[in-house]
Amino acid sequence: MEYVPRVPRPPLDGLIDDLYYLEGESPYARLTLPPPAALLIVNLGAPFRIRAGTDVEMAEYADGCVVTMPTRAWEFGYPLRTRSVGVHFKPWGLAPFLPMPAAELCDRPVTVEQIWGRPAVAELRDRLATAVGPHEMLTLLEEELMRRLCETAGLGLIRHASRVIAATGGAVAIDDLRVAAGVSSTHLAQRFKELIGVTPKRLARTYRFAATVLSIDPAGPIDWADLASGAGYFDQAHFGHEFRAFTGLTPTRYVEARQRFMREHPGHVLDSWPLPAD
């Protein structure tokens, strides 16, 4: 599988972690993708499927999809070969490209056509399909994003608060953020939901969980009680509940899945968050 990432030029770099090109055979037919992630995918191959949570059916996406910050485990079903370009957004970065509040899309992935319109997306996909190589494709995607970039009220407040949450691994007191910003709790929560799709408390939970999971060494012994306590969880049961909500797996099953991925696909370009779901 070929994966080509690129950091966009300013001012997009303040909204986006990277643009990427992905082509080839997925290591597994179904992958679970834990948060945090906000992304846009323009699909150039066969349709893929997404299930936003274990309690819903998988839905098919042909042109691509737009995903705001999720609050649960997501499962991607890939075709035999996949080909796409996409955007990994910072938590606040998707808002300037959406025609609606991000909260309306929370755990409800939509097609790119629903966001940008069918004619515009069809034209973009045609241009991408005829581009010469990944780098030209990413340049076309970057130009499209620059063209669609809009001023967004309240973005500075949410960007600053989100950066503090990310820098502390979700350990910051949300009330301290509110006091520092000079706004009410209600105002801060409303702005977060409008621009990110979740409240600041939910975003902090997501970052705390992500930091905890990324600290796990699947090759060594794990003291789950110590890990949960060190991450600030009330007890191991609370940690286990969060684990299942964010990944769809128990902690033990997660480690088994990570070990399986590392064993069956050593050094794979997707060997970080994605895990086999089957």
Image: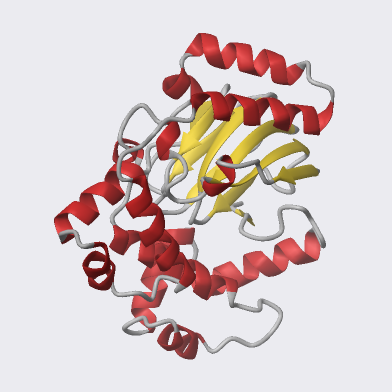
- Indicate the position of residue 277 as horizontal and vertical percent values: 59, 52
Question: Looking at the image, can residue 196 be seen?
Answer: no
Q: Is residue 179 left or right of residue 4?
A: left
- Indicate the position of residue 8 as horizontal and vertical percent values: 65, 41
Task: Tell me the quadrant of the picture where the N terminus can be found.
Answer: top right
- Indicate the position of residue 96 as horizontal and vertical percent values: 42, 35
Q: Nearer the viewer, residue 37 or 192?
A: 192
Query: In terms of image quadrants, where is residue 275?
Result: bottom right
* In the rendered image, the vertical position of residue 166 relative to residue 27, given as above or below: below
Q: Is residue 216 left or right of residue 167?
A: right
Q: Residue at x 34, y 43 (%)?
A: 195
Q: How is the image coloured?
A: secondary structure
* In the rendered image, the vertical position of residue 115 relative to residue 49, given as above or below: above
Q: Residue at x 51, y 72 (%)?
A: 211
Question: Looking at the image, can residue 158 be seen?
Answer: yes
Q: Is residue 187 left or right of residue 25?
A: left
* In the rendered image, the vertical position of residue 234 relative to residue 21, given as above or below: below
**Furthest residue in direction top, as rendered:** 119
Q: Residue at x 55, y 74 (%)?
A: 252
Q: Nearer the viewer, residue 199 or 84?
A: 199
* In the rendered image, the vertical position of residue 179 relative to residue 191, given as above or below: below
Give the total of numbered labels.
0
Query: In terms of image quadrants, where is residue 106?
Result: top left
- Indicate the position of residue 113 as horizontal and vertical percent values: 48, 19
Q: Nearer the viewer, residue 90 or 45?
A: 90
Q: Residue at x 29, y 63 (%)?
A: 201
